Amino acid sequence: MNELLAQLEAILAIASEPVDEVDLAAALETPLGQVKAALETLKNEYEEQTPRPRGYRLRHVGGGWRLYSAPAYAPVVGKFITRGRRARLSRASLETLAVIAYRQPCSRSQIAQIRGVAVDSVVRTLLAHELIEEAGEAPSGAVLYRTTSLFLEQMGMNSLDELPPLSPFMPQSEDLDNMLAAMEDHDE
């Protein structure tokens, strides 16, 4: 079992995206049940932090398993990543990404209406970072956008159901739906 745990750690340490249990079992030529049990063992060991505190956690997100830094060390990791560098996404990009995540699929005009500013360059930036993608067309012909699996992975989520609830100060969903429907009618 210790050898299997070490092999899994070695693979997970170099994985750039979540790794599926079936792929791990195939690569290690080990029964799927043993791989699942070993992954749970590693996850529990990292969470228990014995014999010493661990700087990482093993999480099942985005359809697979991946190592993530421990939340307790977020400030240190954040300093290291941003040391001498600008943040990758601007506030405008993050706001636009939030609108898309909660209202998807939605068009640029819908996003602009909610944010109150033009969003063309911000949408291009999010497309370039592969955090959003085209999701078809509205009846008006406007391109619709949705978040990608990379977005879920970067957020540490398996599905959009894990998004935190919107603030109680936001209009109710029906109000937002009516507002967006009115915008679609206006676009046509």
Image (cartoon, grey):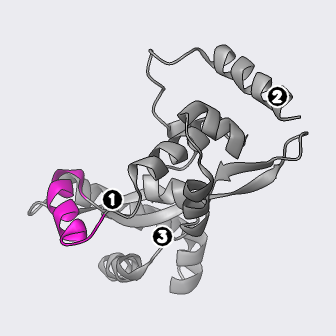
On the picture, is 12 further left or further right than 176? left
Q: Main secondary structure of the magenta part?
A: helix
Magenta-tinted stretch: 70-86
Q: Quadrant of residue 148?
A: bottom right
Pick the quarter of the image with the N terminus: bottom left
Q: CA distance from mark 3 to mark 1?
A: 12 Å
Numbered mark located on residue 35 in the image? 3
Q: Nearer the viewer, residue 115 or 19?
A: 115
> Where residue 132 sits: x, y (%)?
62, 57
Using a 10 Å C-alpha cutoff, classify the residue at mark 2 as few (fewer than 14 neighbours), some (14 to 19) or many (20 or more): few
- The C terminus sits in image quarter: top right
Tag of residue 186 = 2
Using the image, determine if residue 120 lies above or below residue 162. below
Q: Please tell me whether mark 3 sits on a helix, a strand or a loop.
A: helix
The residue type indicated by label 2 comes to His
The type of residue carrying mark 1 is: Lys
Residue for point 49% across, 71% down: 17
* Residue on which disc 1 sits: 43
Where is 55 relative to 104, above or below? below
In percent of the image, x 83 and y 35: which residue is there? Answer: 187
In this rendered view, identify the residue nearer to me: 48 or 111. Answer: 111
Quick one: label 1, few (<14), some, or many (20+) residues within 10 Å?
some
